[in-house]
Image (cartoon, grey):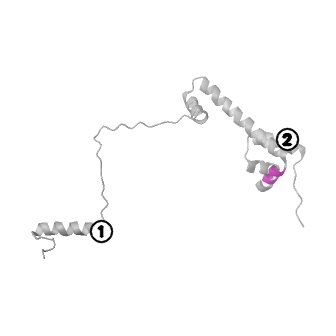
Amino acid sequence: MARPTITLTPDQVREVETLAALLNQQQIADYLGISRRTFQAIYERDEAVAARYKRGRAKAIAHVANGLLQKARSGDTTSAIFYLKTQAGWRETNMIEHQGQVTKVVREIVSPAERLRAMIEQTAERLGTDTRDPAP
C-alpha cells in the first residue's frame, strides 16, 4: 500500500514565503516536521509552494542587496568594490612587470638514432678516431 501524499495547509504554504527568506530547504522541512525530500517533492508538485519559496528567497536577496547598495553609496569602499565585482563584472588584475632580459629557449627534437650517432661522434672526437665509413 502506498504512503499517503503529504500536503501543506494553506497557512503553511503562506509561511513558506517568510521562512524562505531566512532558512534553506532542510531547515524549512525541519520547521514543518517533514523530511527534506518530502519538502522537495511538495515544492516540485505544488506551484503555490514553489512560487512562495522563490518569492521569499528573492525578497531576502533584494533586502540584503539594498543594504549593500546603501553602504556602497554612503562611501563604504569595501561594499562598493564587492557590489561592483558581483553586479558589474569587475575583476582584479595583477600587473606583472618584468625588468630582466627575455631569453628564447629553442628545443630541438632528435630521434634516438640521431642522438646515438652524435654521442658516437663526440666520443670519437675525444679519442681522436674517425667514425666515418672507410673508403672502399
**Which region shows up in magenta?**
39-45
**Mark 2 highlights which residue?**
14
N-terminal of the pair, mark 1 or mark 2, is 2
Q: Position of residue 20 (x, y in %)?
A: 76, 42
Instruction: Give the residue at the far left of this rendering.
Output: 128
Instruction: Give the residue at the far top of this rendering.
Output: 74
Nearest the viewer among 116 and 22 is 116
6 in relation to 94, above or below: below
Q: Amino acid at mark 2?
A: Arg
Residue at 17% in and 66% down:
122
- Quadrant of the drawing holding the N terminus: bottom right
Nearest the viewer among 97 and 119 is 119
Answer few, some or many: residues within 10 Å of disc 2's Cα (few below 14, many 20 plus, some between 14 and 19): some
- 67 to the left or right of 121: right
Q: Residue 48: within the magenta?
A: no
SS of the residue at dot 2?
A: helix
**Mark 1 highlights which residue?**
112
- 2 to the left or right of 95: right
Residue at 24% in and 69% down:
116
Query: Disc 1 versus disc 2: distance between alpha carbons?
Result: 77 Å
